[in-house]
Amino acid sequence: MSELIQIRTRGLVVKSVAPNSPGSRAGLQSGDVIRKVNGVSVNDVIDFQFQTSEERFEIEFVRQGEYRTAVCERGWGEEVGLDFSFELADQIHTCDNKCVFCFIHQMPKGMRKSLYLMDDDFRLSFLHGNYVTLTNMSEDEFARTKEQGLSPLYVSVHATDPRLRGYMLGRGAPEPILPRIRDLGASGISVHCQVVLCPGLNDGAAFDQTVADLADLHEKRSGLSGGTLSVAVVPVGLTQFRHNLYPIRPVTPDYAREFLKTCERWRRSLKPDLGTGFVFPADEWFYYAGQEVPGRAWYEDFPQFEDGIGNMRLFLDQSKRALKSFSGAKALRDLTLVTSPLPSRVIEWLADELRLRLRTEVLVRVVRNRFFGESITVAGLMTGQDVSRTLREEGAKGIVAIPDICLKDGTLFVDDYDIERVRTETGLDVRAVPTRAREFLKTWIPENVLAIS
C-alpha cells in the first residue's frame, strides 16, 4: 500500500541495502526513510534493531514523499541488511550542564564547527562509548534503557558527593548519581565511569569517597546483575582561553606523581575483592609525572581505551610485535613522524627502531600546542597552524606522517585548517596515517618487509 503525503523527512535514512538480504527482498532502497517498525516509531538504530529482532516484521517508510509499508522476513540470526546514513532519526540530545571544567567553553571562535556540539546522549554512549552525565534523561528514557538492555553505558561521574557533583556540573543544586547507577545496575545495566580530576575540587578526600562509593556498586560487592565496571580518571584540560571561567589549578609533575600513588593504592586494595584494578588513570598522568606507562597486564582488557587509557602501551606492544619479523629491506622513502608531547617518547623509540632496521632517515617533529596552550599535550588537539609552523621552523624529510586522530575525515584540523593548506605552506608531502601501530606500519613500509600480526 502507499499514500502520497507531505511530510518532513524524519526517520532513519537508508544509505545502502545489502544484495539478497531481507531488506532487499522486501523492496527497500537507498534513500528510503524508515519511520516505524510494527507500528512503533523508531528514533534511532537501537529502536530499529530492537523492533526487528523477530523473524517477521512490518516496516513503514517514506520514498520520494510517498508513505509505504513493506513486510520483511528473515532467517534466524540473519541481518536485515540495511545501512543508515546516520544512527539517530531525531536530534542529538545536547548537554544542558555548565561544567566548571568544560573544554568546549575554553575554545575560541573559528574552530571546526562539529567541535562546538555538546552531546549528552545516552544512545551515543551505548553505541560509541561517549560519556554522558544522565542529567538530561527522562524517566521514559531510563525505562527504555533498561527495557532494551543498553549496556554498558559510559557515565561522567566526577564526584559522588551530590553537592560537589552538582557544583562541578554547574547545576546550581545537588546532583546525585549513585541512585541512578544502582537502579541501572539492578536492571542488568553495567556502567563505565569517568572522573575529570580537577586539583583542589574533586581530589583528596572527595576522590577517595568517589572511588569507594563506585566500588561498592561493582557487582562483586553489590550483588547487582549490573553496576560499575571501571573508573577512568583523566586530568582536567586547560587552554589559554579560560577568561572569566572558574580558576582551576593545572596539574604539575609533583601533583601527578602523588596522584598516581593514590590510584595505585586504590588498585591494590580493590583488586583482591573486585578482581580488577577498577581505577584507571589516563596516559597523561604518566606523561606529567615523567614515568613510563605500565605493562599490558595492568590495563586488563583495556576497558577505557577510548578515554585515552592504554593507548601508549598498546602502540608500543603492537610495534614491538610487528618489528620482530622485520626482514631488513630498505624503506622506499625517508619519513618524518609528526606527534604531540604526550606520545613523543613512544614515537622517538619507534623512530630509533625504524632508523636501525630500515636503514633510512626517520625524523620526529614534536608539535607544541601554542594555539590552545602548551598544557594541551594530546595528539587529537594538534592544530593545522601549529603543525605547519613546526614543519617550517624545524624542517622535514620524505613523507610527513600526521596522525589521523587530529583530522576530521582525514583532511580538517580542529582549527579549521585543511591538510592541503599545510602541504601548500610547507611544500611537503604531508599525509594522514592511522594512529594505531599495526595500521600505521602497514601504510608506508614496503610490502613483505614487515609481518604484522
Image: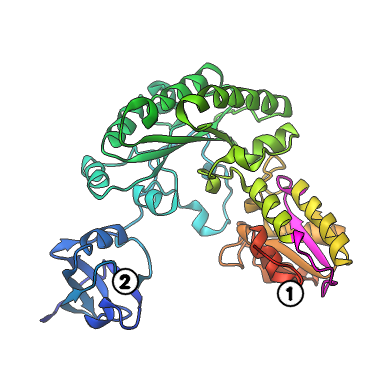
Q: Is residue 451 magenta?
A: no
Residue 116's place in the image compared with 5, above or below, is: above
Which amino acid, by three-letter code, is at mark 2? Answer: Val
Helix, strand or loop for disc 2 = strand
Can residue 187 be seen from the camera position used here?
yes
Helix, strand or loop for disc 1 = loop
- Range of the magenta residues? 323-344
Give the class, few, some or many, for how many residues have Cα within 10 Å of label 1's Cα (few <14, many ≥20): few
Q: Is residue 327 magenta?
A: yes
The percent position of residue 13, horizontal first and vertical second, equals 31, 71
For marks 2 and 1, the one nearer the N-term is 2
Residue 13's tag is 2
Q: Is residue 378 left or right of residue 208?
A: right
Q: Residue at x 64, y 67 (%)?
A: 418
Which amino acid, by three-letter code, is at mark 1? Answer: Asn
Give the class, few, some or many, for how many residues have Cα within 10 Å of label 2's Cα (few <14, many ≥20): many
Quarter location, residue 402:
bottom right
Q: Is residue 333 left or right of residue 412?
A: right
Outermost residue, top side: 205
The residue carrying mark 1 is 448
Visual colour scheme: rainbow
Q: Residue at x 82, y 61 (%)?
A: 354
